[in-house]
Image: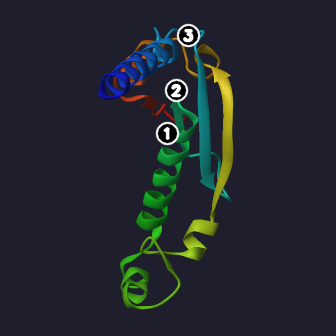
């Protein structure tokens, strides 16, 4: 029975590695990527993340939104909300509501990254799985 379980685990492990290698592969300008963006409701898009995995992109853009909302609070507001209610990750709901989330969309890498940034984007995507492009 143990030999059978060990063999099954070995087969499953090889299968996972093959699936991972097939998904990862070599990243080029024609690779399909996920892009997500957000920005203050009264301004243009100010945050964007590009990645190979939809879940990772979603996580990174939400982290950026929280950091941006925290940095927007001045010190007085921050002190008021440290001990009060209405907190969300240490920030107010109002600050998070002022940031618009534009969703996650599938693109080809060369369609959303300039030719000048393409080598850097490929390197970052290969190393980290995500890339923060320069915002105009």
Q: Which numbered disc, 1 or 3, marks the residue that appears first in the sequence?
A: 3
Graded by Cα atoms within 10 Å as few (under 14), some (14 to 19) or many (20 or more), the crowding at tag 2 reads: many
Identify which residue, 98 or 17, lies in the foreground. Answer: 17
Q: In this orientation, which residue lies closer to the viewer: 52 or 84?
A: 52
At which x and y percent is residue 8?
41, 22
Q: Mark 2–mark 3 contact, CB under 8 Å? A: no
The local secondary structure at tag 2 comes to loop
**Residues at marks 1 and 2 touching, judged by CB atoms closer than 8 Å:** yes
Number of numbered markers: 3
Q: Identify the residue position indicated by label 2 in the image.
A: 52
Query: Residue drawn 44% across and 91% down?
Result: 84
94 with respect to 64 (left or right): right
SS under mark 1: helix
Please indicate whether residue 39 sits to the left or right of residue 74 in the image: right
Residue at 49% across, 31% down: 133
- Residue 98 vertical position relative to residue 123 in the rendered view, above or below: below
Task: Tell me the colour scheme of the image.
Answer: rainbow
Q: Earlier in the sequence, mark 2 or mark 3?
A: 3
Which residue is disc 1 drawn over? 56
Q: Quadrant of residue 3?
A: top left
Tell me: residue 124, above or below residue 29: below
CA gap, disc 2 to disc 3?
A: 12 Å
Above or below, 75 against 71 in this view is: below
Q: What distance separates the C-alpha of mark 1 from that of mark 3?
A: 20 Å
- The residue indicated by pointer 3 is 29
Q: Position of residue 79 (x, y in %)?
A: 36, 85
Q: Nearer the viewer, residue 20 or 40?
A: 20
Q: Position of residue 121 (x, y in %)?
A: 44, 21
């Amino acid at each position: 029975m143990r030999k059978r379980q060990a063999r099954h685990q070995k087969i499953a492990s090889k299968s996972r590695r093959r699936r991972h290698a097939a998904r990862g592969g070599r990243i080029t300008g024609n690779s399909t990527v996920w892009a997500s963006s957000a920005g203050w409701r009264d301004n243009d898009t100010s945050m964007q993340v590009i990645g190979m995995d939809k879940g990772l992109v979603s996580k990174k853009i939400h982290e950026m939104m929280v950091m941006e909302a925290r940095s927007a609070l001045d010190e007085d507001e921050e002190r008021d909300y440290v001990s009060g209610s209405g907190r969300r990750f240490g920030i107010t709901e109002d600050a998070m509501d002022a940031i618009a989330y534009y969703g996650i969309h599938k693109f080809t890498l060369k369609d959303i990254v300039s030719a000048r940034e393409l080598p850097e984007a490929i390197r970052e995507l290969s190393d980290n799985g995500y890339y923060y492009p320069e915002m105009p």
